[in-house]
Amino acid sequence: MTGPSTAAGAMADRVEAAVLARITPDPEFLERVARVRQELLDRVADAARTRASPLIRAVIAGSAARGTFLPDRLDIDLFLLFPADLGRDRLREEGLALGRAVLSEPETRYAEHPYLRGRYEGFHVDAVPGYAVPDPSRPLSPVDRTPYHQAYLEARETPELVAQVRLAKQFLRALGVYGSEARTEGFSGYLTELLVLRAGSFRGLLSVARTWRLPVKLAEPGHEPPRLPADVALVLADPVDPNRNVASALSRRNLALFVLAAGAYLEGPAESFFEVRSRAPISRAAAAARVHERGTHVTVVTLPRPDLVDDTLYPQVRKAERVLVEEIGRSDFSVVGSASATDTGSVLVAVEVAHARRPLVRAQDGPPAGLDRVGHFLEKWTEPGAPVLQGPYVRPDGKLAVETRRGEVDLESAVRSMLPRLSLGKDLTPPDPGAIVVRPLSDAAETPALAAALEELLEKRLPWLRRA
């Protein structure tokens, strides 16, 4: 595929200049952020002296430290680093105590370990305890590499490159693939900055990415991180820890969307590629009308939401969706699509099928004539009361068969019947099976989760092609 034309390049220059004018923080804001960073470090140092804390040092890292943030998406990450021999309980106690000493409205949150979210001078600040490790390839907690990430990028990013990183982040944000949390499965800020640094510019990254074929391996042969999962999308070794894949959170779907968008933008640059479009939630009635037009049927399975952090919950939600879809497909329903979503009280899976009912008759295969188990098959299906509609008989291929009567023919009844034998996720299956509600779309309760799932199910369209 050839590169963009000269005219397209000139248009991209104009588009990117206009976008940068919108997303570049003004000097006063940058000065305010710099002042807040220093004040936080000074206040943590004072608090550590006051309580004789074993804190080794505090570090502001991430986009707030490097200036690569988008003005309306700025959270400040404050890392509190302690000696490597400090016990986990003491690490948590000291880290949260120092966070409470400097932040207002503190709230304990949990990711891979506890941290504190609060506010300072109008900014959200995450105070995250970790260890000051001498070797980032041997971390003791999930955040111990972060100061090394900060040092690596800070030494290499120029003001020009910072602007290119902002463009890349806004582009990914508009696609809905920016963020490495389990809910999004997208590009982390660190991954984005490494990719732009590697390519030299935002447009350089797109020029390379448009040629990628999944899975993409950017690591040198023989130097890939070990133990990569089979469904990996992108492999890029962490420059401070070669055993870690920086892109481990990125899904194949989201990488494929980025690859497609890269080529589309280079061929026809437009500001629409950088615009985050909010859409009105689709109502149950509007969705039902659309489903009627499509001649399909949607069933909605609702479970109580367990008390889990998002990074633990969302992999289980996706597993529940996948397990349901696979079993519905094996049960002689033709699956058209599916979607899952959560809200404060529920987990929801919506499945669209071609027909609401399956045939009453089910063909049951038997063994070839002459095998020992023929007798068992015949005995089973000739017993009085066996739900046989036709047979047993011999098929043209020489095998026995029988046609049986199904107990459930509508999708909702079939799903209720299959639920007890399905493993939806270790924390998703409620103790009371009656807490799982299975209803057709027309009877489903209107909830935020339903609206989100219906949008995903029924409004599929490339982001840059959507109407504002």
Image (cartoon, rainbow, N blue to C red):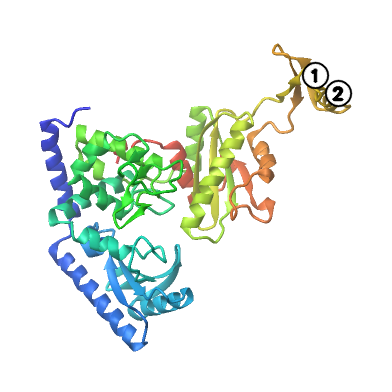
Q: CA distance from mark 1 to mark 2?
A: 8 Å
Numbered badge on residue 382: 2
Q: Is residue 330 above or below residue 178?
A: above
**Residue under circle 1?**
392
Mark positioned earlier in the residue sequence (1 or 2): 2
Task: Label 2, secondary structure: give it.
Answer: loop
> Residue 55 lies in what quarter of the image?
bottom left
Q: Is residue 285 above or below residue 302?
A: above
> Residue 129 lies in what quarter of the image?
bottom left
Q: Are the residues flagged by discs 1 and 2 in contact, CB closer than 8 Å?
A: yes
Indicate the position of residue 105 as horizontal and vertical percent values.
38, 75
Q: Amino acid at mark 1?
A: Pro
One can see residue 439 in this view:
yes
Residue at 37% in and 81% down: 54
Numbered badge on residue 31: none
Indicate the position of residue 206 as horizontal and vertical percent values.
23, 40
Q: Is residue 250 above or below residue 359?
A: below
| Quadrant the C terminus occupies | top left
The one of 263 and 405 positioned closer to us in this rendering = 263
Residue at 43% in and 77% down: 86
The one of 371 and 303 positioned closer to us in this rendering = 371
| Quadrant the N terminus occupies | top left
From the viewer's perspective, is 317 left or right of 279?
A: right
